Image: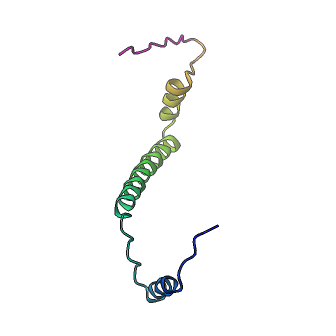
């Protein structure tokens, strides 16, 4: 069952919502907000990189062949594939 919010706190929240002012950040949440902002930036960078790669795949047939060969080990009928493991 959710915790009960006092009438006073509900009024303050409504005031901030209707007035367009941001609600003050409760103590201790600054770190979590900072971590979430960093996570958003990471996902934004991943999205931009994936969009760039997708555009490249849509416009360059050689890029599709490269992915097929490297990721899925596909080959032409007259080729042999050798896979080497890097033991570091």
- Asked if the magenta segment contains residue 87, the reply would be yes
Pick the residue in front: 86 or 3.
3
Q: Which residue is situated farthest in the right direction here?
A: 1
- Residue at left 49%, top 86%? 8
Q: Which residues are magenta?
A: 79-88
> Is residue 68 shown above or below 49?
above
- Which color scheme did the rendering employ for the protein? rainbow
Quarter of the figure that contains the N terminus? bottom right
Pick the residue in front: 21 or 3.
3
x, y percentage for residue 14?
50, 86
Q: How many marks?
A: 0
Magenta span: predominant SS is loop
Q: Residue 27: which quarter of the image?
A: bottom left
> Is residue 52 shown above or below 74?
below
Quarter of the figure that contains the C terminus? top left
- Residue at left 48%, top 88%? 18
- Residue at left 50%, top 45%? 54
Q: Is residue 20 left or right of residue 73?
A: left
x, y percentage for residue 7?
53, 86
Pick the residue in front: 30 or 50.
30
> Is residue 52 shown above or below 66?
below
- Asked if the magenta segment contains residue 82, the reply would be yes
- Residue at left 38%, top 55%? 35
x, y percentage for residue 19?
44, 89
x, y percentage for residue 74?
57, 22
């Amino acid at each position: 069952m959710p915790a009960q919010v006092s009438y006073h706190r509900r009024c303050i929240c409504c005031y901030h919502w209707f007035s367009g002012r941001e609600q003050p950040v409760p103590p201790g949440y600054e770190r979590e907000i900072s971590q979430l902002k960093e996570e958003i930036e990471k996902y934004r960078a991943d999205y931009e990189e994936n969009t760039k790669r997708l555009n490249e795949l849509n416009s360059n047939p050689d890029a599709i062949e490269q992915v097929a060969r490297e990721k899925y080990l596909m080959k032409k009928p007259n080729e042999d594939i050798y896979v080497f493991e890097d033991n570091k």
